[in-house]
C-alpha cells in the first residue's frame, strides 16, 4: 500500500525521467492514484463470541496490532456472547492496546454469568467503561455503521455463531437507513469472512451450531455478498499459546490464556500450572481478512456453495457455483503457528 509520501516520491522520479510527455504523465498519475485507492486498508467489523475459547482474544489482539501497523481499520467489535463480563473485557482489551474509542455492540438477549469464561479476570485486571447494560445493541450498531459507510467497503469478520447477522438481515428501516438489513448488506458489505463449518463437509461445528438451530442456514441463504469460510479444519492443528507463559503476568494474553487453560472444559484436564497450546481458529479468519494470503498461506476453493443444515453441519455442494469460497491450508502448521503467535504479540519483523 502506497503512503502519500511514497506516491509523491514516485511522481517526482517519473517527472525527472520523462518531463516532456505530459499526456502520458497524466495517464500515469491516474493509474497510480487508482491503484493507491484500491489498496486502501480494509474496514473491518469483528463479530465474536469472546470469552469461551481463547482464540477470540488472540484474534482481537492481532487486530489491534494490525491497526497499529496501518493494515486495517477496526470499526467495531460485535459481541455474540451475553456473558455479563464479555463487553467489559473487550473494552478493557481495547483500552489496553490504546484504542479506547472502538464501539462495542452486544446481543441483547439477557446477561448471564459463565464462571469458566476468561472475561471477568480481564475485566478485573484492566480499566473499562462499557458493560452489557450500556453497550449498544449489536443490530443497531451494525445499521449505524453500515449506513454511514461507502458502498462495498465493509468486511465483516465473524468468529462465533451468527445470531447478530441474522438479526441484521431481518432488521427493518430505521433512523439510520431506509433500507432493510438485507439491502444494507448488499449495498455496503464487500465481503464476509466467516470462521465456521468444516470443509468440504462436517457435522455440528460450534460456530455453525451455537445451540441455535437454523440460524446458520438462514444467514448463509440470505447473505447477498461474497463469503469466504475459514473452516474448523484450517486452525485445528495450528497450535498456539504456550509462548504466552513468557509474558508479564499482567498482560491480557497471559491472563486470558492462563484462565482458559485452567478452566475451559475441553482443556483443563491437561492443565499443570502453565498455559497450554490450543487450536488457532479465529486468528486464521482475521489473517485472511487483513492480508488475504491466497497462494501464500492457503488456496481459496471456489466453484460451489456452502450448504448448511439446521444443527451445525454443512457440506460443499458443487452442483452450482456461487460467491462462496473456503480456505484450504497450504502452509505447514508449525510455520503458521509461529507466524500467528508473532502477530498476536505485535512482532511483524
Image (spheres, helix red, strand yellow):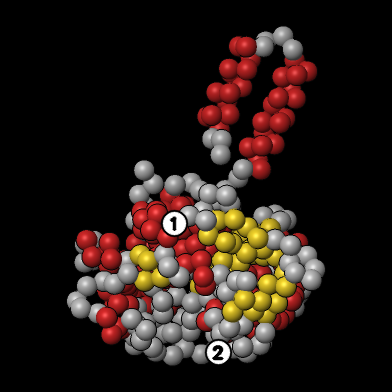
Which image quarter holds the C terminus? top left
- Counting from the top left corner in percent of width and height, residue 324 is at 70, 65
Q: Are there few (<14), some (14-19), or many (20+) residues within 10 Å of tag 2?
A: few
Q: Residue at x 51, y 70 (%)?
A: 233
Identify which residue, 80 or 272, lies in the foreground.
272
Q: Place residue 276 in its image quadrant.
A: bottom left
- Counting from the top left corner in percent of width and height, residue 307 is at 70, 77
Q: Place residue 185 in its image quadrant.
A: bottom right
Element type where label 1 sits in the image: loop
Relative horizontal placement of residue 285, taking residue 305 as reference (left or right) = left
**Would you place residue 191 above or below residue 85 in this image?**
above
Q: Residue at x 66, y 70 (%)?
A: 143
Res. 122 visible in picture: yes
Q: Residue at x 54, y 81 (%)?
A: 205
Q: Earlier in the sequence, mark 2 or mark 1?
A: 2
Q: How many marks?
A: 2
**Would you place residue 318 above or below residue 33 in this image?**
below
Between label 2 and label 1, give the one nearer the viewer. Answer: 1
Identify which residue, 29 or 218, lies in the foreground.
218
Q: Residue at x 42, y 68 (%)?
A: 237
Residue under pointer 2 = 211
Identify which residue, 154 or 260, lies in the foreground.
260
**Would you place residue 235 above or below residue 38 in this image?**
below
Residue under pointer 1 = 332
Element type where label 2 sits in the image: loop
**Residues at discs 2 and 1 in contact (Cβ within 8 Å):** no
- Counting from the top left corner in percent of width and height, residue 47 is at 54, 70
Res. 105 visible in picture: no
Q: CA distance from mark 2 to mark 1?
A: 33 Å
Amino acid at each position: 500500500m502506497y503512503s502519500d509520501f511514497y506516491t509523491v516520491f514516485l511522481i517526482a522520479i517519473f517527472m525527472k525521467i520523462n518531463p516532456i510527455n505530459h499526456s502520458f504523465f497524466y495517464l500515469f498519475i491516474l493509474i497510480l492514484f487508482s491503484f493507491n485507492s484500491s489498496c486502501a486498508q480494509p474496514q473491518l467489523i469483528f463479530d465474536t463470541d469472546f470469552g469461551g475459547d481463547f482464540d477470540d482474544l488472540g484474534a482481537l489482539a492481532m487486530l489491534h496490532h494490525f491497526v497499529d501497523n496501518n493494515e486495517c481499520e477496526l470499526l467495531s467489535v460485535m459481541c455474540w456472547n451475553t456473558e455479563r463480563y464479555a463487553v467489559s473485557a473487550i473494552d478493557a482489551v481495547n483500552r489496553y492496546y490504546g484504542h479506547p474509542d472502538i464501539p462495542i455492540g452486544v446481543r441483547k438477549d439477557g446477561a448471564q454469568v459463565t464462571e469458566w469464561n476468561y472475561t471477568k479476570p480481564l475485566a478485573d485486571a484492566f480499566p473499562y467503561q462499557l458493560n452489557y447494560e450500556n453497550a449498544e445493541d449489536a443490530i443497531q450498531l451494525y445499521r449505524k455503521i453500515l449506513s454511514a459507510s461507502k458502498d462495498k467497503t465493509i468486511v465483516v469478520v465473524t468468529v462465533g455463531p451468527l445470531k447478530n447477522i441474522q438479526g441484521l438481515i431481518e432488521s427493518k428501516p430505521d433512523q439510520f437507513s431506509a433500507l432493510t438489513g438485507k439491502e444494507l448488506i448488499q449495498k455496503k458489505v464487500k465481503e464476509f469472512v466467516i470462521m465456521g463449518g468444516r470443509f468440504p463437509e462436517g457435522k455440528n461445528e460450534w460456530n455453525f451450531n451455537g445451540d441455535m438451530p437454523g440460524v446458520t442456514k438462514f444467514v448463509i441463504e440470505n447473505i447477498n455478498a461474497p463469503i469466504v469460510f475459514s473452516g474448523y479444519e484450517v486452525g485445528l492443528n495450528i497450535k498456539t499459546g504456550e509462548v504466552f507463559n513468557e509474558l508479564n503476568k499482567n498482560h491480557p494474553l497471559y491472563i486470558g490464556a492462563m484462565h482458559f487453560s485452567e478452566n475451559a472444559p475441553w482443556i483443563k484436564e491437561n492443565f499443570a500450572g502453565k498455559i497450554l497450546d490450543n487450536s488457532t481458529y479465529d486468528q486464521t479468519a482475521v489473517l485472511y481478512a487483513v492480508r488475504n494470503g491466497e497462494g501464500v498461506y492457503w488456496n481459496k476453493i471456489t466453484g460451489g456453495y456452502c450448504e448448511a443444515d439446521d444443527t451445525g453441519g454443512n457440506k460443499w455442494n458443487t452442483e452450482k457455483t456461487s460467491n462462496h469460497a473456503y480456505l484450504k491450508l497450504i502452509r505447514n502448521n508449525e510455520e503458521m503457528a509461529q507466524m500467528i503467535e508473532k502477530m498476536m504479540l505485535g512482532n511483524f519483523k
